[in-house]
Amino acid sequence: MDDYAVRLTRLSYTYPDGSKALDGLDLDVRKGERIAVVGPSGAGKSTLLLHLNGILAGSGTVRVLGRPVEEPNLEVIRKEVGLVFQDPNDQLFCPTVYEDIAFGPLNLSVPPEEIPRRVERALHDVGLEYTIRSRSSHHLSQGERKRVALATVLVMQPAILALDEPTSNLDPRNRRHLIELMASLSATLVIATHDLELVLSLCQRTVLLDRGKIWADGETRQLLGNDRLMKEHGLEVPLSLRVFDRMARPS
Amino acid sequence: MRHSFIDRYANLDSPLHMLEPRTKLIGFTGMIVAILMTPPTHGFAFFVYLFLIAIFMGISQIPLPYLVGRALLLLPFVLLAAVATPRTNGQGLYAFGIVLVRSILCLLILILLTNTTRFTEMLKGLQGLGCPRILTLNLGFLYRYLFVLTDETLRMRQARDCRRVRRAGMVDELKLLGSMLGTLLARSFERAESMYQAMLSRGFAGKFYVTSPRKFSWLDLGFLSAMAVFLAISLWR
Amino acid sequence: MHIPDGFLSNRLAVSLDVISAATVLYAARRAKVDTSGKMIPTMGVLAAFVFAAQLLNFPVLGGTSGHLVGGALLAVLLGPMCALLTMATVILAQALFMQDGGLIALGANIFNIGAVTVFTGYVVFELLGGVRSTGKRLAIAGFLAGWLSLLFSSACAAFELSLSGTIALRVGLPAMTGYHAIIGVAEGGLTAGILSFLSRVRPDLVSARARYRFGLADWIGALVLVAVPFSIFALVGSSKLPDPVQSLLASALGSGSSAAPSPRLLSDTPYADYAWRILFLLGFIAVAFVVARFATGRGKRV
């Protein structure tokens, strides 16, 4: 077994209406790596993530932890790849928080006696009180919902976490908490995001996706600091890099 | 945004609230059946029923104005029945009165049932009583997404009001309502699609599983004996 | 339009409970077999949609207000089996959440508002061009599907009420169908409008691929499900099942066709006596209520 978490080879995907979402992507992610996928809206970031656990299946190959993402591997892969969606409302569909978090383990045939312990662990890991478990998710704040959504995935103990815009719609304090939380995880992280400061603080490697193709793949600070590259693909050099740059240059 | 119109009193703390949901479902339904089976010759029996129901109403801690207000739900049918009753003889009036009394009593029982049981418990009770899985699942999703949809509807209405200068004619209003509803519907489908993807991502393979239940206690026995009393009254000749 | 408990005769209510239970179970079995797991969240979300839409009232003719029932619309979008299941869920939810419609009358309500609207809407829509129609034809088919679904549904309700003896047909039928003929215009309009909107914005939703196909086996099953109980209904007048209200009302209306002779119900005592007794009893009951309230008075206000 190689030590790659994810290997994408010539991955292409076309939407039902004919437009190309992904166009011959090649990407290799090592185990334990933290990689960010950045790009303008509509670049195909979410579509890419949906290929990691087989929700979408394009042409080309997708290998996760050495296995091809297709039947009969899907059951194992969906346990090992935890996908956190952009809108927590889509992910929290049970009447109570407890049932939402228990949903994953129940599907994995975890013995029923184990479940309460796992739920408690998951809630603890995302920094929420155990008492929240009997509340209904529509009574929670957006920050709490994002954390519960993360808990529903963490409880399955995945080796790889794929997160779609994890910090969107969060106030500064909740954002900070979430970043600290993600930093403490040992899983391989694949983060699709517009939040470039998040990328700087968390991910050593960044991949630039635009119009379904990868235009750049390299060390985060170098990639994000490339003013021309950023502008060409509808992005901007993040503020902290610009300031740092300004400070480093003699006046 | 907060909407508690559905669950409003289900989170109170009375002895009725603490009963196991299956007991309540069977018990209250049994009481309704008993009321419906009582021959109208036993007018006094209805007073006894009302007495027992009043005790339950008191125990439940649900505010009286709310209980009475819900009785207005009966109004259209009561009016129709009133119009249709021949007023010439006492028999007819008595018959109408019986219909009125029965429907009010049944409604009060239904209000008690629904307002003393938290929704998730109701689902578990239904599932435990053999309700088809697909119905309880749908009910669960309905509950969860009702609030999301209501939020979206309110926001849409606000957005519409921001851009509206004066009220248009009824046809235009309906057209507007139509496109609002159409958008909501399209979004509902999209939401269902995302939800399905989220379910697949967490290992869903077609079967749903259940988590932990509530326990049966002496309170439940007490309640079921109350139901037995109802049935005894109705069957007594 | 949801019938509360107490307005239908027992044997009618129970027969409808049986019919609806059988229909729903049948639909559940078919839906599980023939559709993918994707239908389940779709039905759930649409149930929430219909429930929410039914809460949105719009004014009709000044005083009264109406709301979208949605049976015909769902029948077109989901196919009759899944539409029936979704409507059954909504009606169950309305009884359990809003106390709209009784528990014993649940079968009747599922039959009227779930089954009749869905099947009428589906049949009318298919006969008028089906899912392949566009533009004006789609709108007209949608309108008629919606309008007729409400008409048939309210007519059924009126018949049920009259068979129970609660509300005579001469009053019930014109009232229910008349009211719903007017409301039905809005239902038809909204159904047509939404279908047109969707056919422009999300045409894949208004296509035959999106839903379950109603096969021959289903038609036969539906016929059996409906024909058997209807024959039972036809025998309702001569049935020996005890139905207190039915016999009482039959005697009151002088039809004299029911089994037992009606007992003397009101004696010749003047009404004043009764009034005092009733008042006393009511007072006693009120005291019981207050005592019970304070005895267990530790309710948390939410």
Image: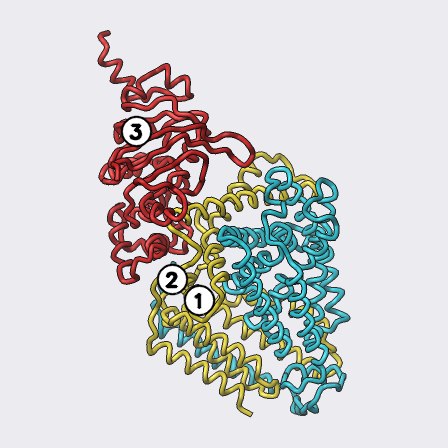
Q: Are the two marked residues, 2 and 3, in contact with CB atoms closer than 8 angstroms?
A: no
Q: Is residue A24 above or below residue B99?
A: above
**Chain whose colour in the figure is yellow:** B
Residue C65's place in the image compared with A230, above or below, is below
Tell which of C129 and B13 is nearer to you: C129
Task: Give me the disc on residue B127.
Answer: 1
Label for residue A46? none
Q: Colour of chain A?
A: red
What residue is shown with label 2?
A: B210
Q: At 54% across and 78% down in the image, what residue appears? A: B33
- Asked whether residue B237 appears in the rendered view, the answer is yes
Q: Classify the position of the C terminus of chain C by image quarter.
A: bottom left
Q: Residue at x 53, y 43 (%)?
A: B187
Labels 2 and 1 within one chain? yes
Q: Are marks 2 and 3 on the same chain?
A: no
Q: Chain C rendered in what hue?
A: cyan
Displayed quadrant of residue A220: top left
Amino acid type for the residue under numbered disc 3: Val
Q: Chain of mark 1?
A: B
